[in-house]
Image (tube, helix red, strand yellow):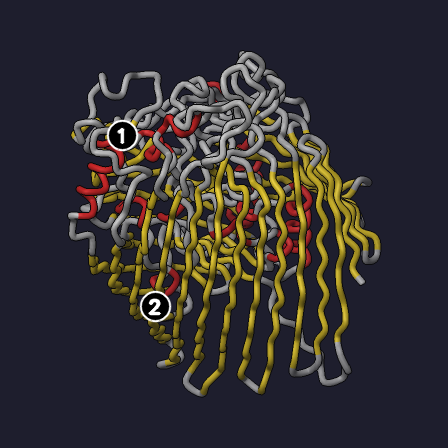
Amino acid sequence: MKTFRRNTINLFALVLLASAHPSNAFAAEAKSEEIVVTAAGEKEKKALAEKRAKTSDTAALLSDTPGVSLATGGGVSSLPVVDGLADDRLRIILDGMGLICSCPNHMNPPLSTLNPNQVGELKVYAGIAPVSLGGDSIGGTIVVSSPEPEFASAQQKSINKGEVGAFYRGNSHARGVNISATHASEKFSITYRGAYAEADNYKAADDFKSFTATGRPGRDIPKNEVGSTAYETWNHSVDMAWKNADDLYEVKLGYQHIPNQLYPNQRMDMLDNKQEVINLHYLGKKGWGKLDARIYAENVDHYMDFGQDKQFYYGSSPVIAPGMPMYTNGVTIGAALKADIDLSRRDLLRLGTEMQFYRLDDWWPPSPSELPTGWTNPMTGYHSAGMAPNTFWNINDGKRDRYAIFAEWEAKWNPAWTTLLGTRAELVSTDTGDVQGYNNDPSGMYYEGYLRSATDFNALDRQRTDINLDLTALVRYTPDDRQTYEFGFARKTRTPNLYERYSWSRNAMALIMNNFVGDGNGYLGNPDLRPETAYTISASLSWHNADKSRELKVTPYYTRVNDYIDAIQWDRQNNVPGTPVSNPPGKFGILKYANQDARLYGVDVSGRTPIGSNGLGEWGLKGLVSYVNGRNLDTGSGLYNIMPLNAKIALQQKSGGWSNTLEVVAVDAKTDISEPRQELTTPGYTLVNWSGSYTWKNIRFDFGVDNIFDKFYYLPLGGAYTGQGMTMRWDGIPYGIAVPGMGRSVYVGMNVKF
C-alpha cells in the first residue's frame, strides 16, 4: 500500500509540478459541473475514435473520467461507478430518456443499448447534479447524446455523406463493422447508423483456476480462458429532424438485437435481447427563452438461460441437461416538458415536469419436460430442483410510476460570482401482482421456497408510494479567467427498484437468479424498503491557462446516505436474519435487502500539461488519481464494489497525422470489502498500454496494445467468477475466484469517411 502510494505520487508529481505555477493557473469546472467527453471539436472527435477502436462497450468511453470506474458485466454491458455509487444509484439519460434495466441480473443497463459509434457527446455530472438533470438517484448523472442533426446551408443544395469502419482485437478475436449515412437539405435531415460486433471468450495472462471442465460437468475450457465473456450485438438507429425557423422537431428510432452476451460473474447468460425505442423531441426558441418537450417509449424483450460454458452433462453421460429458460419484458413510456425562462440578464429560471410509466413482467417457464434419450425418471436433472410443472412468476405485472416537478434558479451576480439553487419533488409509486412458484405441492421439499413464500407474498399489500425531495445549492467563484472555486450541497433521493422490493421466493435456486451485483450470492427482496436519501457536500478547486492546455483540478467530496439499501445475511428456511451456520464463511450465501446508513468520502485529482516539442512532434502529460472510501455505519463493514486507490498517467506525442499515447495504470490492492456479501479481495497491479493513430485525408487508422507486458490481475469490481460449469448449484463452481482481467491484446481499426 505504501509503495503504491509513493509510486503514484512520483508519477503524478510530473503533471502537478508542470502545471502548478500561478501564471499557468486555469479556470476550473466544479464537482457539479460536467466533465465533457464530446465530439464537438477535432481533439474530442479523435479521442472518441481511439476509444471506439478499443471497445464495443459504451460505458468504457468514460474510463478516463476522474472518479469513474467500471463494474464487470457482459462484454458490452459494464456498469459505470461514479464516486463509489453505481447502477440505479446513477441517473443515466440517453437522448433525454431515462431508461431502466429489465432483468433480474441487470444485463441490459441503459448504456449497453448504444454502440460507441452512436455516441456524439458524453457528460458526467459527478457528485452534485442540477435538479433539472437529477431525480430518482443519489449519485451522479451521465448524459449521453447522439450527434446533433446536420442541415445544409442556404448555399448548399444538400449534404450527402457517410462513414464505414471495421476493427479487430486479438485477445478475444473481437471483430466488428460500423456504417453511417446522412442526407440533409436546408430543412430536413436523416441519418442512419448501424454497428455489428462479436467476440469470443477472452484469455487472462495466466492460468487462474485449478480445473478445466474435464472431470467436471460442462464444456472443456482452458485454465487461462475466462468463461462466459463472449458476445454478439447489432445496433441500428434512424434519426430524422425538421427545422423551421427557431423550431426543431426530431424523431429517433432505435433497434438493438443481442443474440448472445455471456456473463462471467452471473449464474445465467443473456441468450437473446431485443430493444425497440421511439423518441419524439421538440426544441423551440421563444422570446422569453427556450422550450423543450419530449415523449418516448421503449420495449425490451429479454431471455436468459445457460450459455455454452454453463451447459453441463448429466452425470458421466455426454447428454446435455435441459436448460432453465427465464424471460423478461419491460415497457417504459415517458414524457418531459422543460422551459428555460430568461427573467433578466442576471437570472435564469428553469421549470419542468416529467412522467415515467414502467411495466415489468419476469417469468420463468418450467424446465423443458422432454427428456433426452435414456432419461426415464421425470425428476431427473433440473426436475429434481422442483422446476415444474408451473411457470415461475418472479415479477408479475410490476409497476413503477414517477411524477416529478422541478424549479432551478441560476443567477450570475457579477463576473466573479454565480449561484444555482434548485428543488425537485417526485412521487414514485410501485406495485406488483400475485406470484407463483414452479410447484404447489404442500408436502414437497420446496414448500418453504415456493408455495409458502408465494402465499405469504400474495397476502401482502404490496403497493408503496414515496414522496421524494431533492435540493441543490451551488456557489461558484471565478476571480479571474485562470481559476475557479466551487462549493456545493445536495440532497438526493432514490426509490428502490422492483427487484429490490419484490423478489419474493426463498427457494435457493430462485434467490441466486436475482443478483445484479455479480457476487455469486442469492438475494431476497424487501417490500418495506424505504427510499435512499443522500446528503452530499463537495468542493472543486481548479486552475488552468487560457487555452486549457495546462490544468489542474482537485475535487474532494463527502456523502452521507440514510436508508442505504445494503444486504444482510438471511436464513431462508426460517425467514429470519442469518447466522454463521446458515451462511458459512467462505461459501456463497443468501442475503436480504435492508435499509442501513452509509457514508462515502474521497477525492479526485486530474491534470494535464504540455512538456515541449522536438523533431518527433509535440509532447504532453496527463493523469488522474481517484480515491473513495465507503462504509456501512450500522455494521462497520465496507460497502460493496468500492474501487481501491487508483492512478493513471499518460505520455502523449503528436506529429502531423500521427499520435501516440503510452499509458501506465496503477491500482491498489482491494482489502476493504463488504463483509455480509463475503466480497473477494484482489491484489494490486500495474498495467502498461500503448495506443496510436494515423489520419490521412478521409481515412483514419487506430492501433495499439493493451496490457503490453501481459500482466495477470484480477478485476477489483469484477465480482465472483461463475463463468462455467454447474453454476446453478452452490458447489457448481469453487468459491473464492475473482474475475481476471484480460491479458495482452493487440487491436487495429480503420474508418473511412465519404
**Residue 669, above or below 164:** above
Within the image, what quadrant is residue 503 found in? top left
Q: Amino acid at mark 2?
A: Met
At numbered mark 1, what does the secondary structure look like: helix, strand or loop?
loop
| Distance (Cα) linking label 1 and label 2 | 41 Å
Within the image, what quadrant is residue 704 found in? top right
Spot occupied by residue 375 in the image (x, y as percentages of width and height): 49, 24
Q: Confirm or deny contact between disc 1 and disc 2 (CB under 8 A).
A: no
Q: Would you say 369 lies left or right of 402 here?
A: right
**Residue 159, above or below 433:** below
Residue drawn 20% across the image and 37% down it: 452
Q: Amino acid at mark 1?
A: Tyr
Residue drawn 53% across the image and 46% down it: 59
Mark 2 surroundings within 10 Å by alpha-carbon count, few (fewer than 14), some (14 through 19), many (20 or more): some
Depth order, front residue of 477/527: 527
Residue pointed to by mark 2? 355
Residue pointed to by mark 1? 446
